[in-house]
Image: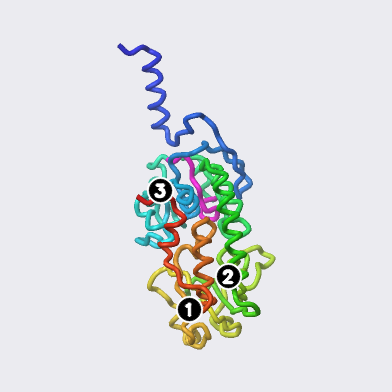
Amino acid sequence: MWNISRVAAILGLAAMLSSGSVMAQDGKTVSITDDRGVVVVVPENPQRIAAISYLGVDVALALGIKPVATTYMTAGRQPDFLLGLTGEMKSLGQRAKPNLELLSEVRPDVIVAMKRYTVGNAAQFEKIAPYIAYNMELLSESYQEVSDLSKVFGKPERGEQLNAEFKSHLADYAAKAPKNVHPRFQIMWGGDTPFSFHTENTAASIVAALGGDNIAGPMQQDGKFGMEISLEAMLEKDPEVIFVYDSGPDRPHENNPIWQQLSAVKNGRVYYVGDEWVETNGPIAREMVLREAAHYLYPDTFPAIDVRAEAAKLIPAGVQQ
């Protein structure tokens, strides 16, 4: 017969499992101060990671951990830089409108979220699981985000190694880039009035480090990471290389006759780039953007890359199954 203490222990475990997120088995926790300035206490080595944006997925996969849920950038598209593994995770909807009901159903141990899309509902997220919100906008923030999440995910040394390796790779590529050549570039969302990204933005920082000259320039006093630049203003600045975030077949900017007058368009140097250019702060995404950008800026110096093949080198085989 079962004794009372054993029954109580089983019932206690069942209650904990049914209540939502489950703390680490040894009860250890990690404290992280996120970009809200909030100290978030999370279980060490969480087993069920949910991501609002791809940063949490990117870091987790680089550490050999597969999250249980994520949002998407474009419906039906599984990013190559994440090897399509997002298709094996519960979809929480588009990153700007995550479905809280679906999030609750996956019983996450921790939620890693983009601040601007979730901070308004912070209280609701916090009821589901410990909620960490990051800006995920600037290269200067990327290193801290990778370091923090690697601690949360139980592999702090690997996180520091990933940061050190990227800094080394960035310096190496920059050293090999042609000297005294500074192609004018622009990184933009497509639209009637394209939204373009300042140099501090992570992808733009990488391109600038390779010698590119960003027509959007540095961040303004308002602190926003990007700005609208009309086609007329684009023609005046005349970028030689344009990177357009590929959000699908709707490309209204191409219907403006000014578009055809741009040097980048005339010379076939407009590149519709993948989700790694939008959410670049993770260790896999920033490495892919570095390699892609080097080739697009200097095709005679750096070879084209296969994003999936390169990403596969950064994601442990155990999570690729």
The residues bearing labels 1 and 3 have C-alpha atoms spaced at a distance of 33 Å
User: Which residue in the structure is indicated by mark 1?
Assistant: 270
Image position of 72 with respect to 45: above or below: below
Image mark count: 3
Q: Earlier in the sequence, mark 2 or mark 1?
A: 2
Residue nearest the observer in this picture, 60 or 188: 60
Quadrant, the N terminus: top left
Mark 1, other Cα within 10 Å: few <14 / some 14–19 / many ≥20: many
Residue range highlighted in magenta:
108-119
Q: Amino acid at mark 1?
A: Val
Is label 1 or label 3 in front?
A: 1
The residues bearing labels 2 and 1 have C-alpha atoms spaced at a distance of 14 Å
User: Which residue in the structure is indicated by mark 2?
Assistant: 207
Residue 188 location (% of width, % of height): 52, 72
- Image quadrant in which you'd find residue 227: bottom right
Magenta stretch encompasses residue 57 = no
Residue 184 location (% of width, % of height): 59, 79
At x 44%, y 62%, the residue is 310
Q: Does residue 181 appear left or right of residue 118 in this picture?
A: right
User: Which residue in the structure is indicated by mark 3?
Assistant: 69
Q: Does residue 142 appear left or right of residue 189 in this picture?
A: right
Image position of 292 with respect to 5: above or below: below
Q: Check contact, mark 2 vs mark 1: CB within 8 A.
A: no
Q: Earlier in the sequence, mark 3 or mark 2?
A: 3
Q: Amino acid at mark 2?
A: Val
Image position of 299 with respect to 276: above or below: below
Residue nearest the observer in this picture, 257 or 283: 283
Q: Check contact, mark 1 vs mark 3: CB within 8 A.
A: no
